[in-house]
């Protein structure tokens, strides 16, 4: 059970970092290439 | 932060984060296709193009007679699903005017005088005024362009569509025939050249 919790915590941090990078990529692309992202 | 994490049901939170990541990245992947999908949808499942074709046929229309056309001078291009005001303004104010839509190059002629009337616009967006010429590359030889100018309708037929370097200013030169020249930046991803469409006058109503 403790191992499970630890795994979930690691997953949580990894997912949080990936989410942050995804959001950053989204805004970067929106800023640099507004033709594609602004309708 | 650690206390907060310990209180959360991490399994559910992780599922939520995963879903968010998938959604954001799917949008990033699909975004370049959105303008083409929008265009396809508008040409196949929307009445917009048909309405604009009808508008060109049934003109001249004054501002109050139709909801489709308003403003004194407008460009109507059914192929591009465009019906937008053609703005006037000095070269010194080019930046602001182009952000508002289509600009008639002030050093060029006007439709009532004949010669070469030049219009330019941005492609910054596939909808909205600063993306008026986003679909300029969709125009093909033979397509009809309507221009409402001082209450009269000028109909033009596209005769050429070509890409030239930005240093080629001959596209702005006056001509003996009455024509309009539309140009914008190309290609979309790395706009280093100019996409130029020339259309010859067919009729005035």
Image: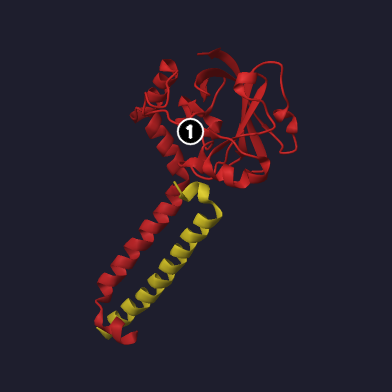
Q: Secondary structure at mark 1?
A: strand
Q: Residue at x 65, y 19 (%)?
A: B113
Q: Residue at x 34, y 30 (%)?
A: B46
Q: How many marks?
A: 1
Q: Residues within 10 Å of mark 1 (few under 14, many from 20)?
A: many
Left or right: residue B185 compared with residue B4: right
- Up the image or down, A26 lies above or below B118; here it is below
Chain letter, colour yellow in render: A
Q: Where is residue B42? Give x, y as percent.
A: 38, 32
Of the pair A26 and B185, the residue shown nearer to us: B185
Residue B162 in view in this figure: yes
Of the pair B2 and B80, the residue shown nearer to us: B80
Which quadrant does the N terminus of chain B fall into?
bottom left
Chain letter, colour red in render: B
Q: Where is residue B200? Give x, y as percent.
A: 61, 17
Left or right: residue B58 compared with residue B196: left
- Up the image or down, B98 lies above or below B69; here it is below
Residue B185, quarter of the rendered image: top right
Left or right: residue B127 compared with residue B14: right
Of the pair B51 and B138, the residue shown nearer to us: B51
Q: Residue at x 38, y 62 (%)?
A: B21
Q: Where is residue B145? Give x, y as percent.
A: 52, 22
Colouring mode (rainbow / by chain / secondary structure / one colour): by chain
- Up the image or down, A31 lies above or below B2; here it is above
Q: Residue at x 54, y 18 (%)?
A: B154
Residue B190 in view in this figure: no
Q: Where is residue B57? Give x, y as percent.
A: 43, 16
Q: Which residue is mark 1?
A: B84
Q: Chain of mark 1?
A: B
């Amino acid at each position: 059970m403790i191992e499970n919790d630890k795994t979930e915590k690691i997953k949580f941090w990894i997912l949080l970092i990936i989410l942050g990078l995804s959001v950053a990529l989204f805004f970067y692309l929106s800023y640099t290439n507004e033709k594609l992202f602004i309708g | 932060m650690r206390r907060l994490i310990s209180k959360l049901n991490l399994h559910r939170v992780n599922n939520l984060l995963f879903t968010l990541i998938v959604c954001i990245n799917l949008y990033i992947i699909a975004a370049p296709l959105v303008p083409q999908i929008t265009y396809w949808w508008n040409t196949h499942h929307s009445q917009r193009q048909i309405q604009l074709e009808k508008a060109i046929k049934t003109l001249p229309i004054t501002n109050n007679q139709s909801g489709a056309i308003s403003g004194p001078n407008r460009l109507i291009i059914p192929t591009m699903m465009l019906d937008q005001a053609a703005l006037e303004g000095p070269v010194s104010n080019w930046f602001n005017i182009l952000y508002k839509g289509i600009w008639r190059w002030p050093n060029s002629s006007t439709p009532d005088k004949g010669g070469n009337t030049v219009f330019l616009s941005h492609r910054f967006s596939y909808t909205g005024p600063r993306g008026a010429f986003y679909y300029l590359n969709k125009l093909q030889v033979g397509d009809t362009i309507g221009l409402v100018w001082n209450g009269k309708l000028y109909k033009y037929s596209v005769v050429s569509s070509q890409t030239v370097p930005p240093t080629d200013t001959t596209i702005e030169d006056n001509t003996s025939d009455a024509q309009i020249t539309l140009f914008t930046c190309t290609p979309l991803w790395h706009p280093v050249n100019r996409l130029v469409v020339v259309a010859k006058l067919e009729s005035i109503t």
